[in-house]
Image: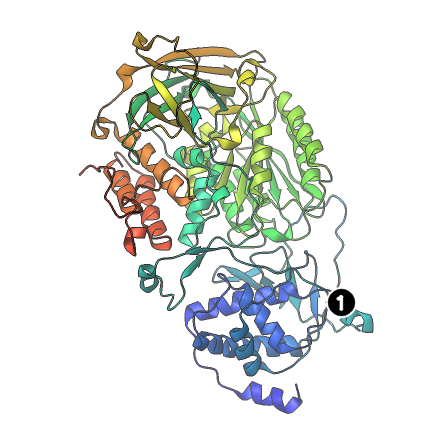
Amino acid sequence: MTDEALSTLKSLRAPQPSTEARKLALNAAMVAFDAAQAKTKISEEAGFFTRLAQKMRGGWIAAPAGAAALALLLLPVGYQALNSTSMTRLEGPKVGLESKDDTLKEELAKQAGASTITSTTTEAPKPEGEANVSPQAPVVVRGGNEIGRADGTVVLNAPESDQRFVMGAPQDEIAADALAAQPAPSVTAKMRTVAPAAEATLGIASQTAIPLEPTGDEFAKFTENGVKIVSEEPVSTFSIDVDTASYAYVRSVLEDGYLPEPDAVRLEELINYFPYAYQGPDSLEAPFRATMAVIPTPWNNKTELLEIGIKGYVPPAEMRQPLNLTFLIDTSGSMDEPNKLPLLKRSFGLLVDQLQDGDTVSIVAYAGSAGIVLEPTKATDRTKILGALDQLYAGGSTAGAEGIALAYQVAEQTKQDGSVNRVILATDGDFNVGISDPEELKTYIKSKRDSGVFLSVLGFGRGNLDDALMQSLAQIGNGNASYIDDFREAKKVLVEEGGANLVTIAKDVKIQVEFNPAVVSEYRLIGYETRALNREDFNNDTVDAGEIGAGHTVTALYEVTLKGSGGELNDPLRYGPAETVDATSGELGFLKMRYKAPDGDQSKLITAPITSELMLDDISKASADQRFAAAVAAFGQKLKGSNYGEAMSWQQIAELANSSKGTDPEGYRAELVQLINLAGVLSPDPSDGGRSACDDPNGAKTDCPSMME
């Protein structure tokens, strides 16, 4: 571009943009800086702006007018990039973007012209063992983004990467070979069809698709539990699960206007997010008690829901054990976003406020290398602990394995008999340095678990969240995995449920249900796919399972088909086995539960029959807790595109949840109703623009689930 053309661009007066347009433009500009690689030359400004537009959330602009406005908004950004003496990248992986919108390409190219952007790469070394401590120049925050420091350094945070770019550094000489273009992977967004009726509500104009949550976060892949035939597989075995990360993550995605990917929706974590008023045990002699009921299935009038609710013992205040906590904090570059490290520090501040005189806190931080930020300190010295948290800042790569090893070493120094010893890892899950062998790391965590130091994981942010690894580490470390998306969730996890999440009353808890083939023909466990165990694992005390904390409630649901109901999904065998089981016993099945004491090695057994006396003939007779758990299961199944829960509409699910909120002092159940309605906007039912879910393919009405007033 000529100097005259640049001068003309400088004198242009762009129309005043809306607040949302400014936000989109800034996000796009940050991503563009993130995409600038060492030894990379972008030869045309049109390609530069195309990459900006493609990376914007959703991956598309609704109308050509929007593209023109975007181009005008980004001209100052492009001008500054052209005139900057250099753009220095300190760290981070390569990011490439590729646009598929030819119309947008042409429009932006027409608006822009041609230019060249060059970059150099430097990396600031960090002394070995030094933690990331805040520099003297304070960070300036506007609109939730760090935009600079008081010393004049300009910082732009790209929310979906671990990049930091600093503009205005002294000009460096650029070698000719540094201008060679590098190939870049394309970034695409998954899409889900939206009925035309939803377009006006969402303001999409002519678009007919809503993107799923953009790729980048990693989740464990699993296949939804299917229907089992009791005569062939009468026994179901699984590990207990009290994690709640999935619900908080799903909520965060929905509130941003996206649909979560199916593997992010773990049904048991949605159900267990909510407290239930089950009756607990009277003493630690039996650390938890099971409550059971069988109610009509709200999405299938030919099946029943078997609900197993467990309540953990709550020790009296005088029995409280001292806490020996080690905060292991990720301070890598990817944590440099408002909903990551700043939220993390405020969250730990909440926890510190709950500690008592005999408790101890240590802080270890890790990035390019791991370091001790705070030696073991009594909780009474609150000012010192909060001061150590406050001075942390983000920068560097992620030496996760080194940080974990150092945290365990610190925890071992202050471990005492009769105390709760726990490492709390807080991270966005981006372990990109230091783990050459994940299995070796898991073996190490297992050895520390067996020595009495447990590990819990708190996840923050989106874009590079390694949920699969976080879940795995928490399970192996005898801890919980939670996701903190805002300050309110931090309060729930660390204050309201602090005792349950920190104090373990039973470990390696397993559940096994044997169904009576004379009464039950089929069953399906709802959720717990990642917690499945082999039948023989139940009596094997070397097999790891989940933990229950003080006062924890855990819920498991089975959808069961009774014999003679006509709801079977499998045809009977021509040459089936002879019936030898007594159908007059009145038992649907038999419940068995195994657990170990927190410091024990041998399991104990709890058993209870599942009798026909537990059956209710109308869902209105079920308790509010039982009906609400069924509503959460229906919501999760529909949200993830389950093969089993599509018969209920969003409105029916919302009505069931709303009618069963019961006592809801914190508003968590009311919030679920809002999320159900939001999901209905993002993925409308066929009845909103076509055939009802209760119609058969030929148009004839079938029996729809009846809902209560």
Q: Name the spot of residue 110 as percent of width and height, x first.
A: 56, 82
Q: Amino acid at mark 1?
A: Lys
Quarter of the image where the C terminus is located: top left
Colour scheme of the rendered structure:
rainbow
Q: Is residue 379 left or right of residue 670?
A: right
Q: Quadrant of residue 301?
A: top left
Give the tally of numbered discs: 1
In this picture, is 590 found above or below 27?
above
Q: Does residue 151 appear in the picture of this structure? A: no
Residue found at x 69% / y 30%: 409
Q: Name the spot of residue 570 as percent of width and height, x first.
A: 40, 28
In this picture, is 694 found above or below 96?
above
Residue found at x 47% / y 24%: 548
Local secondary structure at mark 1 = loop
Q: Quadrant of residue 20?
A: bottom left
| Residue 290 or residue 639, whichever sits in front | 639
Q: Does residue 312 appear in the picture of this structure? A: yes
Residue found at x 47% / y 11%: 605
Q: Is residue 275 left or right of residue 339?
A: left
- Residue to which mark 1 is pinned: 39
Q: Is residue 546 left or right of residue 401?
A: left
Label 1 Cα crowd, 10 Å radius (few <14 / some 14-19 / many 20+): some
Q: Name the spot of residue 113 as percent of width and height, x first.
A: 61, 83
Q: Quadrant of residue 468?
A: top right
| Residue 534 or residue 478, whichever sits in front | 534
In this picture, is 683 found above or below 20?
above
| Residue furthest to the bottom | 4
